[in-house]
Amino acid sequence: MRAVLLILLTFLLQGLVSGLMPAELAPPDLPFLAALALAGFYPIHTGLPLAFVIGMLQDLLSAGYPGLHTVGLLCGVYVYYRLSRSFHPDELLGQITILGGSFLAKWLGYALIGYWLRGGPFGFAALTGVFASEIIFTLGLAPLLLGWARGLLGGRHRE
């Protein structure tokens, strides 16, 4: 029930932030951070399906490419699980590595789906502006949102 509440609040907050930000800047990807928070709380066999559901909801609500956010979140959460076993998530360097690697994997998933759906390379010049503003805002808000999500979910549960 707490996971559902976290997902609903994340999508409401995403809509609010997206409406308040200027059109030139990409808003932070709060559903991605919620998927990472749930991945930190649940084991991989629960976290990956939750990431799939969050990605599908994000695809349905954004009316964009079908499967874009789904594949991106699955790639990001999978890399999160892999990196959280190799690096300590409570240390600053470990957090930077885990969040940065997950974010890059999410964008690799976006690039793969964009390439596949468009049948060739797409406008990377326009994509770099979106990438730059999203990485600044998403990773800048990551400690705040992940801490809030841990409080909402109630500590570490994953085994």
Image (spheres, rainbow, N blue to C red):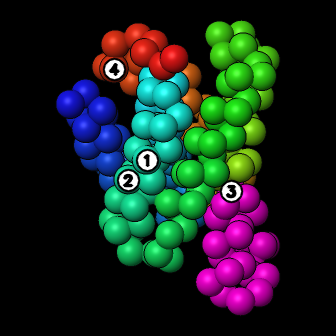
Mark 4 burial class by Cα count in 10 Å: few <14, some 14-19, many 20+: some
Q: Could you tell me residue 79's position as x and y percent?
A: 69, 40
Which residue bears the numbered disc 2?
Answer: 53
Question: SS class of the residue under badge 3?
Answer: helix
Please report whichever mark, 1 or 4, sits nearer to the chain's N-terminal start: 1
Frontmost of labels 4 and 2 is 2
* Residue type highlighted by circle 1: Pro
Residue located at (68% from left, 56% from top): 107
Please report whichever mark, 3 or 4, sits nearer to the chain's N-terminal start: 3
Q: Could you tell me residue 93's position as x and y percent?
A: 79, 17
Mark 1 vs mark 2, CA separation in Å: 6 Å
**Left or right: residue 95 compared with residue 70:** right
Where are the magenta residues, as a range? 107-129
Disc 1 + disc 2, Cβ < 8 Å: yes
Which residue bears the numbered disc 4?
Answer: 153
**Left or right: residue 3 compared with residue 72:** left
Mark 1 vs mark 4, CA separation in Å: 17 Å
Q: Could you tell me residue 95's position as x and y percent?
A: 69, 21
Mark seen at residue 49:
1
Residue 127 falls inside the magenta stretch: yes
Residue located at (56% from left, 51% from top): 74
* Residue type highlighted by circle 4: Leu
